[in-house]
Amino acid sequence: MKKRVLRVILALVMTVSLITGCGAKEEPTAETEESTAIEESAEPAEAKDSVIIAMGKGSEPASGFDPAYGWGAGEHVHEPLIQSTLTVTTKDLEIDYDLATDVQVSEDGMIWTVKIRDDVKFTDGEALTAEDVAFTYNTVKATSSVNDFTMLKEAVAVDDTTVEFHMEKEYSIWPYTMAIVGIVPEHAYGPAYGSNPIGSGRYIMKQWDKGQQVIFEANPDYYGEAPKMKKVTVLFMDEDAAFAAILAGQVDLAYTAASYSEQTIEGYELLSFASVDNRGFNLPAVPQTTDASGNVIGNDFTSDVLVRRAINIGIDREQLIENVMYGYGSAAYSVCDGMPWYNEAAEVSYDPEAAAALLEEAGWVMGTDGIREKDGVKAAFTLMYPASDSVRQAMAADTANQLKLLGIEVSTEGVGWDVAYTRALYEPLMWGWGAHTPMELYNMYHTVDGGSAVYSPYVNETVDKYMDEALAADTLEESYELWKKAQWDGETGVTQDGDIPWIWLANIDHLYWSRENLNVAEQKLHPHGHGWSVVNNVDQWTWD
């Protein structure tokens, strides 16, 4: 904590000295570049139609603002900001239209027909047509480095306002994919598009100083309601620099960590937004073995379903949230809490007595050293966490402390992502997930190519069947019920009374320092990533 305080003080001194012109002249560093960006971006107090926002450095899209390379998906998920999308998600995370005026799917589920608006222009004055939509989707299918478009065969422009999506397989949740793909202009698309994007959304990207800031200005020809915020400046800063910028009064809204939440800053208030940005760890659900390639898969201790059930109810989530997140979070029971496809059967209560009974039933007897044993083997495992993530490190440590009370010895280890994915096939890893699509469930639990699930060994043919049926459903509403059954159908699933191959701990609240007279519009559940989600509706923000 002392190191963090010193870093904040240093960042604050650097910021203030540059703004006031004090201090000796020196060569620019990463810190001084951040401070210079603040100085150049600062607006006079009387400006009521602009806002300055500080985001984490990791929120800057490395490949630029190109949908083919991730912009619009994951942490960058957005309603039409630079580009427009065919659909959007509502506050309830159901589907509404943006460019689309009608969406129909064929009886066999293999062709989606979308009618689009005829009054939309790109910011270079050219009309947006179905040709641009088809071009965009065929491009992202061919080049996307982030999203999976294997379900799409091709997109075809039928006429100027009609596009057909021909599918490789039935995919009932296609409208959720359409909500994250921004439409680009075929006539103006090329290798440099991400650095100089042309779109038809609410804002025009006017300036991008890589590593420092990006500036957006309202699109005067936007087809929807004119943005109230005419200028939006986003600064990319680490936590300490963002906090220093708030202390110096140089930004209007800045993300922050829960460790800063007990501070009081004159002129600012702390905003807390609920999320489905969940943290939890996998429990390999098969005994340890070695595959044909010599890779270790499975874990003898966690392969026992009684052990997994004991762990799930043997962790006090509320205590963990208080200890690690200063209370800014909510208990998580699945990868999709609060979504239309969430099954409340996933919810459990903390019950250490019942957890101990399950371990006893499984043959794990308490030893004299306080650690359970079975056939001479200790009840133990290693819980990994990403070495660069202090929150997941703290969560792993808290989990280890709690499970020790049950007689389970957990060793924690920070690892890099270069080895994490491979080791997670036989040792639990503290993960972070959360997206506005049911495919998050599919990616966690569905088997691949007749084998096991991708991120942690697990197989359940019934769960697979429900998810396959969900993708083949006639309507989204029908698919929601099938996704729920994949979680628990009364007899099997991935919840407590089922296989419980993942332990979900907490959904992290996203915290921001905000000027007291800034009215941030109501937020929908934020997905994984403490970044662009907050500006989804920045056009609706106002000043008192």
Image (tube, rainbow, N blue to C red):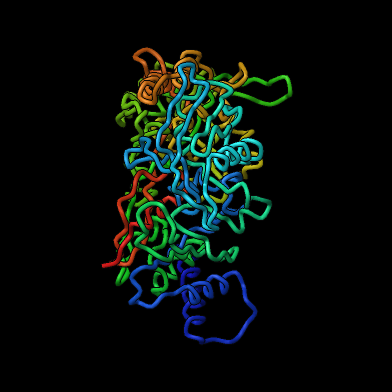
Residue 542 % position (x, y): 30, 63
Quarter of image, res 319 = top left
Residue 12 % position (x, y): 46, 74
The furthest residue to the right:
293
Query: Looking at the image, can residue 2 be seen?
Result: no
The furthest residue to the left:
544
Query: How many numbered callouts?
Result: 0
Compared with 443, 360 (above or below) is: above
Residue located 38% across and 36% down the image: 95
Q: Quadrant of the N terminus?
A: bottom left
- Taking depth in this image into account, of 35 and 124 the one nearest to the observer is 124
Residue located 47% across and 61% down the image: 239
- Taking depth in this image into account, of 63 and 378 the one nearest to the observer is 63
Residue 460 % position (x, y): 50, 16
Residue located 50% across and 82% down the image: 17
Q: Is residue 346 left or right of residue 387?
A: left
- Taking depth in this image into account, of 521 and 474 the one nearest to the observer is 474
Quarter of image, res 93 = top left
Residue located 68% across and 52% down the image: 191
Q: Quadrant of the C terminus?
A: bottom left
Q: Is residue 391 left or right of residue 275?
A: right
Compared with 132, 209 (above or below) is: below
Q: Is residue 60 left or right of residue 491?
A: right
Compared with 542, 158 (above or below) is: above
Quarter of image, res 452 = top right
Query: Looking at the image, can residue 427 be seen?
Result: yes
